[in-house]
Amino acid sequence: MSENETKKSATERLEDLENMMAQVGQALSSLEPMTRDLLQIKDALKLLNNKLNAVARAASEGKLPTDEVVSGFMTESNAQELKGKVDQMVSNGLLAATDTVAKDSFVVINESDASGTIVNPRMQFLLSALQHPEVKGKLEGAKIGDNIKVGDQGASINVLEAYNVVPPKAPESSVTEAPAASESDNESLTSSSVPAEATV
């Protein structure tokens, strides 16, 4: 082979690169359903683990593992997990506590029914991501400890915690960088609540 036959023009090299990228894209898109399935399996295993732990806890405390007892322990465990995520984000410097909810705050609330019974012990979310305009409007400007009536059935929400989201600092040449947000931190900043079916 001569040297001219092995050399490719810039256009030919770009076309080869585009073809390779298309093949990579096709390979990745075929992995998407598998990734989705794996995430669903992960969630199912997490739920099963939580339920088994709740049953074991009921047995160790001498309680019958009724649906109500197991559900209560599972809810408590989920609330603790959510609290742990917030504590981690605070320790990583991503959240800073505040006493007043701003339009871009990260908020932790619980929900009570008309009789004052807590029906959802912990919901946490970025206020700016909340899709419920009435609740969003009532939360903005609220203080920690405020009880806010929502809806027409006498339900209320209690503001438990509020945080400002700390913007990342620009890296300085000689200063150690702040810890990067992990995938779970970013996931936690959007919205989380204990029972998935509970709504505000």
Image: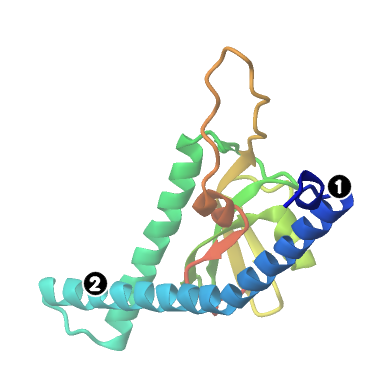
Residue 71 percent location from the top left of the image: 34, 79
- In the rendered image, the quadrant that contains the C terminus is bottom right
Between 74 and 8, the one nearer to me in the picture? 8
Image location of residue 40, percent across then percent down: 48, 78
* Residue lying at the far front of the rendered structure: 1
How did the renderer colour the structure? rainbow
Q: Which element type, helix, strand or loop, lies under badge 1?
A: helix
Q: Residue at x 71, y 78 (%)?
A: 152
The image quadrant of residue 113 is bottom right
Residue 197 position in % (x across, y down): 54, 80
Identified at 88% across, 52% down, the residue is 11
Of 63 and 190, nearer the camera is 190
Q: Which residue carries the number 2 mark?
A: 53
The amino acid sitting under disc 2 is: Asn
Q: Which residue is mark 1?
A: 10
Which amino acid type corresponds to the residue marked 1 in the rendered image? Ala
Q: Name the residue at 65% across, 80% down.
A: 153
Q: Which mark is residue 91?
A: none
Label 1 crowd (10 A; few <14 / some 14-19 / many >=20): few
SS under mark 2:
helix
The answer, for residue 84, to whether it is visible in the render is: yes
Rendered view: 67 above or below 184: below
167 and 155: which one is in front?
A: 167
| Residue 113 visible from this viewpoint | no
